[in-house]
Image (spheres, rainbow, N blue to C red):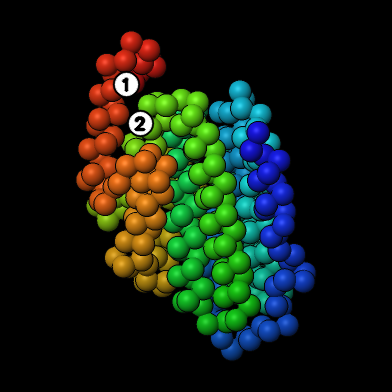
Amino acid sequence: MLYPELFKQLEAVRWNMDHDIPWADFDAARLSDEQAMTIKMNAITEWAALPATEMFLRDNRGDSDFSAFMSVWFFEEQKHSLVLMEYLRRFRPELVPSEAELHEVRFEFDPAPALETLMLHFCGEIRLNHWYRRAAEWHTEPVIRHIYETLARDEARHGGAYLRYMKRALARCGDEARAAFAKVGVLMASARRTAQALHPTNLHVNARLFPRDTVQSRLPDTQWLERWLDQQIRFDAAWESKVVERILHNLSLLLERSFASVQELNRYRKEMAAALAASPAAPAGA
């Protein structure tokens, strides 16, 4: 089992909201209304770890190890929402999300293949690590900069934990896991060719609720994410390239094959799809 070791590793570096956030350093003159509003939107977005956890537990009923790890991931992700709300409570109380605004992002996700979902969230952690690092640079108020730097490190650790489960999946599922990871990797590393930010909170997950079936579509300001990325933190092509590089680097190590570009990964995806289709034990729908 991976859960006991991961629990110890994450417990050893867990930060304390009261003692590890420098609340006394707050500088009101360095927090704009525009910046404060983005903190509210991120606080609500982080609350969506709740329905994501419900999805993970439902779709991984046969995997008690991974389901137990969700207890750690869920706790730390909800803590992200909580620390952002605590910042607003202290310094911009009029912007603290209401319970109704938080509950709005709790909705059911359609069932999905567990391996693809695992890879999707691995990529999401990489992307969010980079988004938060850039947000820390954009903000001018020292306490919120420290908070975003702290959250970015958490997201990187979560990505590392997901990677451990991906390695385990390769040993258990072989080409089925390789095909799933390559398929989602191509999608998540192709953000420059899409009109929207590629992150789990911005993907459609419930056909019955379409088009209000993304986390971002259920926020008080449904357009804030694109504005935050493009106009505020300016997550430009150079930063996007860093995300793509990390995805390709990790997949190269995981799959033991070098991927210098999304195109190379896509060729590998096609190879794996063909191998699965030709296998007499190919899973239904492969």
Q: Residue furthest front?
A: 256
What x and y, as percent, mark residue 281?
Answer: 38, 12
Q: Residue furthest top?
A: 280
Q: Point out residue 252 in the picture as x, y percentages from the top left corner.
A: 36, 46
Rendered location of residue 264, percent (x, y): 23, 44
Query: Is label 1 in contact with label 2 (beta carbons under 8 Å)?
Result: yes
Q: Quadrant of the N terminus?
A: top right
Nearest the viewer among 165 and 59 is: 165
Identify the secondary structure beneath mark 2.
helix
Residue that carries the numbered disc 1 in the rendered image: 276
For residue 73, say whether it is visible: yes
Question: Residue visible at 67% across and 39% down?
Answer: 3
C-alpha separation, residue under disc 1 versus residue under disc 2: 8 Å
Q: Residue at x 35, y 31 (%)?
A: 179
Please state which of residues 86 and 237 is positioned toward the viewer in this rendering. Answer: 237
Residue 215: mark in rendering = none
| Residue receiving disc 2 | 179
Quadrant housing the C terminus: top left
67, above or below 45, in the image = above
